Image (spheres, rainbow, N blue to C red):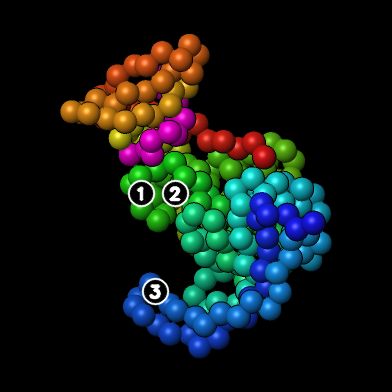
Amino acid sequence: MQNSTGHVEFVELSNRVQLGKKFVRYDTEIKETRYDLREALTPFIPANAIDDVVAIIQKHNIVLRIETPRKESLGVCFWSHVICINNNLDKDRFLSVFLHEFAHMLTYFYFLYFAVHGKEFYYCFQELVLKFIEKNIIPKDMLIPIVDHTGDYEFYKKHIGFTFILKTFRIGCQVKYGDEIIIRGKGHQGLINCTRLSDNTVIKLDANTKVLPFLDLTW
């Protein structure tokens, strides 16, 4: 029986058209689609990471497109559920690109307003990578190469003390407010209704209240 919660597509790219400095269009042809995720990912993902990557894909119903190489990037995330990765990467690099692109997806899940590689992304990326380190899937010394691939490590260190404001989060997201976990609700006249999870009490907070994302990193 096919698993409807995520799948892998093997894609051929052709006819690259430059639409601007940052935008490129390709013609795409899906060569094959696989729902057996473990079988599809075994040639691309380190063995000790396959279970977690499969679980992430299934939980978030991700379409992972393994493509003939793009000239301008190693991978691309199309926000809601599609991640594209070049098919010519070694297993460690493939995993690092997957984590990078999934961090973009997490950023989209939680934030209304964000730069592509802004502090919102780096917070999600850091938490995701540290989760894989804590589970002994990747070694601690792999953190720097993942973040430093394009000179981003200095940015990562600069924003180690992350702060965010409540109004930048999507309605329904869980955030950390002091020692409490709250759910961001709707706002009115500069105040936002939030539900405190410890006792389900609704509290009103200023839209500019400083909070942190409470990322769902269980899969």
The answer to whether mark 1 and mark 2 are in CB contact below 8 A is yes
In this rendering, position of residue 136 left or right of residue 64 = right
Q: Residues within 10 Å of mark 2 (few under 14, many from 20)?
A: many
Q: CA distance from mark 1 to mark 2?
A: 8 Å
In the image, farthest residue toward the bottom: 15
Using residue 45 as the reference point, say whether residue 144 is left or right of it: left
Whether the magenta-drawn stretch holds residue 173 is answered as: yes
Magenta run includes residue 190: no
| Residue pointed to by mark 3 | 23
Residue at x-position 60% and y-position 77%: 69
Between 72 and 35, the one nearer to me in the picture? 35
- Mark 3 or mark 1, which has the lower sequence index? 3
Q: Residues within 10 Å of mark 1 (few under 14, many from 20)?
A: some
Amino acid marked by disc 1: Phe
Chain part drawn in magenta: 168-178
Element type at marker 1?
Answer: loop
Q: Position of residue 15 (x, y in %)?
A: 50, 88
202 lies above or below 39: above
